[in-house]
Amino acid sequence: MSATGNRRTPLIAGNWKMYKTVSQAEAFIAALLPRVSSLQGVDVAVCPPYLALQALVDSARGSPVQVYAQNMHHAPEGAFTGEVSAPMLVEVGVHGVILGHSERRQMFGETDRALQLKVPAALEAGLVPILCVGETEEEREAGDTERKLRHQVQEDLARVETGRLGEVVIAYEPIWAIGSGRVATPERAQEAIAFVRALVADRSREQAERTRVLYGGSVKSENCGELLCLPDIDGALVGGGSLDPESFAAIADAAASS
Ligand code: 13P
């Protein structure tokens, strides 16, 4: 049994976004490993920029820390300048990949149609996808949160075989909470995350019980305890709070022991 009272192992993933050079990433992992190596009952992942993936995979080998990428193209190879494919990530030893982060959706034109191809491509290559979903402030104020989540979850997972839905990690990241310091209240986070799980259950109850659903948006070591103890929340996707090894390790520790 995990800390959250179910059989899903919580995942604490640090999304570094466009922060840290290779040498900064190496310094981070050297400081993180001793702080998390004895934690039980929690998966810990770091998601650096592409250039630091190899260095982190090498440094984290044999440790409980997994390394994820922040994006990938759906095709295994091709004339797609500037893109990186799933087999390329797998060869480097990457464990998984963040897909559909709101920053990619809003600033780089990531579409639900592209995600429909990316999520199954990641699974097929052996990567764990972390699919990000979430509403804007305007959508929330208009009472459109559930409509937005339903659309994103249904569309983005449409081509995932039902029997593999439980392998997908979903991160609920309300866009208004990202980088704003305005963390969702535990009630709101629990409600939205239970709704996301119910959407997966519409296709398979059994798979929905396996699917890990994370919360993301202004998670810090100071506020993570009240979120991680909620019944449907299986961990966190952490941005700013993952850039410092001590604060990130404290979040992982809270997930292991809450
Ligand atoms: P912050 O934790 O900095 O709000 O970022 C959240 C996020 O976007 C993680 O993917």
Image: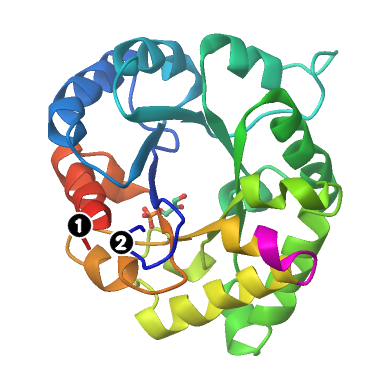
7 within the magenta span: no
Q: Residue at x 47, y 71 (%)?
A: 232
Region rendered in magenta? 202-207
> Is the residue 189 above or below the residue 181 in the image?
below
Q: Residue at x 36, y 66 (%)?
A: 4
Q: Residue at x 59, y 63 (%)?
A: 209
Q: Position of residue 6 (x, y in %)?
A: 43, 64
Do callouts 1 and 2 mark residues in contact (Cβ within 8 Å)? yes
206 within the magenta span: yes
The kind of secondary structure element at disc 1 is: helix
Q: Position of residue 48 (x, y in %)?
A: 42, 28
Which amino acid is tagged 1?
Answer: Ser
> Is the residue 234 above or below the residue 195 in the image?
above
Foreground pick, 92 / 63: 63
| Quarter of image, res 235 | bottom left
Pointer 1: residues within 10 angstroms few (<14), some, or many (20+)?
some
| Quarter of image, res 58 | top left
| Quarter of image, res 1 | bottom left
Pointer 2: residues within 10 angstroms few (<14), some, or many (20+)?
many
Q: Position of residue 214 (x, y in %)?
A: 47, 59
Distance from the alpha carbon under mark 1 to that under mark 2: 6 Å
Specify the label residue 257 is tagged with. 1
- Residue hosting label 2: 3
Which amino acid is tagged 2?
Answer: Ala
Which quarter of the image is occupied by the C terminus? bottom left
